[in-house]
Image (tube, helix red, strand yellow):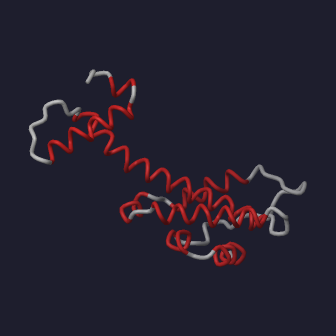
Amino acid sequence: MPHDLYERDVLAWSIHQAELLRLMASGERVNDIDWEHVVEEIEDVGISELNAVHSLLRHMLVHLLKLNGWPHLGACRHWRGEVIAFQTDAERRFAPSMRQRLDLAALYARAVQQIEPLQYGGSPGLLPPAACPVTLDELLTAPCTALEAAFRAA
């Protein structure tokens, strides 16, 4: 295999490297493994999953803030559906080691920044809670109605 395959076609490279690793795992002697990139890609898999969960949780918070800020708009039903979809995906992809790497306060601050310039129905929304009114565990598992109630109560 050409040495520049990683740069030219990462899919073909990954399939080839997986074949070589399987051969090595079965006891065959293999000399062509691109260890530098294999190690880098393995690290990237975890970071990619962490970033995906981070993004899903932020999107959840944005939609919860919209529900809190504009509770009487027709879009609320759509926003609830989005919260549920994002939560389902976040819960499925969440791994225990992510807990120490997810900063809920920073995620919440970013979500607040994202909705600040928004206006729906010609008006700005109600002020968001000063701090995130739910925990990470609640965000991952609580029903949307409970999350909405926590935002209203804050």
Q: Is residue 19 above or below residue 86?
A: above
- Rendered location of residue 148, percent (x, y): 69, 73
Q: State the residue at coordinates (33%, 37%).
A: 14
Q: Is residue 22 above or below residue 69?
A: above
Viewer-side residue, 25 vs 105: 25
- Rendered location of residue 10, percent (x, y): 38, 32
Q: Is residue 81 above or below residue 39?
A: below
Q: Looking at the rendering, which quadrant does residue 57 occupy?
A: bottom right
Direction right: furthest residue: 122
- Rendered location of residue 136, percent (x, y): 51, 68
Q: State the residue at coordinates (22%, 35%).
A: 35
Taking the image as shown, residue 4 lies to the left or right of residue 143, namely left
- Rendered location of residue 12, percent (x, y): 36, 32
Viewer-side residue, 88 vs 60: 88
Q: State the residue at coordinates (59%, 61%).
A: 86
Taking the image as shown, residue 143 lies to the left or right of residue 44, namely right
Taking the image as shown, residue 62 lies to the left or right of residue 141, namely right
Q: Looking at the rendering, which quadrant does residue 19 occupy?
A: top left
Numbered-mark total: 0
Quarter of the image for the C terminus: give it: bottom right
Quarter of the image for the N terminus: give it: top left
